[in-house]
Amino acid sequence: MARELHDVIAHNISLINVQASSAVHRRDPERAFEALEAIKTASKDTLRELRTTLGVLRQVDEQDGERAPVPGAGRLPELVRGARHDGLEAVLTVDGEPADALGGPEPPAPVGAAAYRIVQEALTNVRRHSAADRVEVAVVHGPGSFSVRVTDNGSGGAPGGRTPGNGLRGMRERILALGGEFSADFRPEGGFQVYARFPVE
């Protein structure tokens, strides 16, 4: 639950911070309006996801208020579109081909939810720490496995993990709990990469 709350809050509040900072520094009325729209959307999404997460604890009836969609692999394209909206050149590939939808077999729900949160956290770190202008999210349906890879062309952070803290630790815990593999580090050719591979039946 702590990981879930961290992922919900850190991701969306980071988006709000990026948009607000952009509006303040550029002082362009049109851009300021766009930033306010993005802030409105991100804050609404935060409230919906928090309501859903806390509803699990409270065992609230599903009809009592608006609920956010359950995080899953099928929502990965939504995260990529959000990164584009924030000014990144964001690309989604599925099994090596550019895609606008996930396609392929849907992984089990726990794997899909973990993959969603890992990509969400990785994209948040790109926005906050990397100074990147391009990021690629690669999804691979392997034999008996499902993997996601988030690669950027930025810089910044500390070797062995861009910013030591709850984000990378939470990713690792999610993956290891499902018997998977995880790595996050700088690439020799430049940029940073987060990789997660999950075993699936």
Image: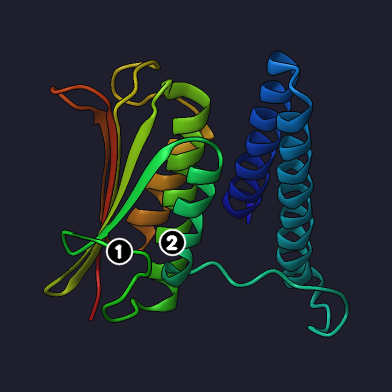
Q: Are marks 1 and 2 in contact (CB under 8 Å)?
A: yes
Which residue corresponds to the image point at 35% horizontal and 55% vertical from the top-left?
175
Q: Amino acid at mark 2?
A: Pro
Q: In the picture provided, is 150 more to the left or to the right than 187?
A: right
Q: Residues within 10 Å of mark 2 (few under 14, many from 20)?
A: some
Q: Which residue is mark 2?
A: 77
**Residue 157 drawn above or below residue 91:** above
Q: Which residue is mark 1?
A: 99
* Residue 42 can be seen, yes or no: yes
Kindly give the residue lying farthest to the right in the view shown: 64
The answer for how far apart the CA atoms under marks 1 and 2 are is: 8 Å
Which residue corresponds to the image point at 33% horizontal and 76% vertical from the top-left?
107
Q: In the picture provided, is 127 more to the left or to the right than 39?
A: left
Which residue corresponds to the image point at 63% horizontal and 39% vertical from the top-left?
10
Q: Amino acid at mark 1?
A: Ala
Among the 4 quarters of the image, the one containing residue 62: bottom right
Q: In the picture provided, is 93 more to the left or to the right than 162?
A: left
Give x and y (percent) for residue 36. 78, 38
Give x and y (percent) for residue 120. 49, 49
Q: In the picture provided, is 124 more to the left or to the right than 40?
A: left
